[in-house]
Image (cartoon, rainbow, N blue to C red):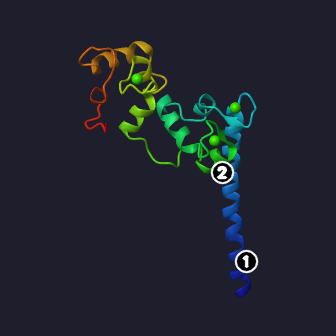
Amino acid sequence: MTKLLLLGLVALPLAATSAHAQGTRKLDKRFLKADIDNNNALSPLEFQATQGKRVSAAYSRFRFNRADTDENGAISLNEFRASKAGTTNGKASRLDIFLTADLNDDDELSPDEYIDTLPPRVAYPKAIRSFDKRDKDDNGGLSPREFGIRRFPL
Ligand SMILES: [Ca+2]
Ligand SMILES: [Ca+2]
Ligand SMILES: [Ca+2]
């Protein structure tokens, strides 16, 4: 009885470790595959290749920025592991996506900036039609409101 209990106690942590190790191995594989230039770090573009097919460029950048804890503009293997490929730092709000996509910080999304907020597989003509529909005042840029944000903290 005592022996069995002891065995159980020893076996449990072992099982947990191996599941964890397996998860880490999978993450490591994804990391190595995406690190095209073999510099042991993922650039924003390399990082995007580790994300799901429906993750937009802006969402990928949002995850990248949060996962890059030492803020050196690259994701190390440890940062990749710690954030589980960037997925453990919370969901991006519409506002987060707007701010991440607005690369030139003019509080408007240009067509190219807007396209970064769409799933990568959306065809260009369709993306432009969707942009035009949102651009109510036809000024060639989407304001936060046109993008669907009611209150913009300025
Ligand atoms: Ca790299
Ligand atoms: Ca980093
Ligand atoms: Ca802009």
Quarter that holds the C terminus: top left
Q: Earlier in the sequence, mark 1 or mark 2?
A: 1
Looking at mark 2, is its residue's CB closer than 8 Å to ligand 2? no
Location of residue 106 (image quadrant): top left
Q: Secondary structure at mark 1?
A: helix
Q: Which residue is mark 1?
A: 7
Residue 122 point in image, percent of width and height: 44, 21
Ligand 3, image quadrant it occupies: top left
Which residue: 59% across, 31% down? Answer: 44
CA–CA distance between discs 1 and 2? 25 Å
| Residue 31 in which image quadrant | top right
Q: Position of residue 76 (x, y in %)?
A: 67, 42
Mark 1 surroundings within 10 Å by alpha-carbon count, few (fewer than 14), some (14 through 19), many (20 or more): few
The residue that label 2 is drawn on is 23
Lateral position of residue 11 relative to residue 52, left or right: right
Number of marks present in the image shown: 2
Question: Which three-letter amino acid code belongs to the residue tagged 1?
Answer: Leu
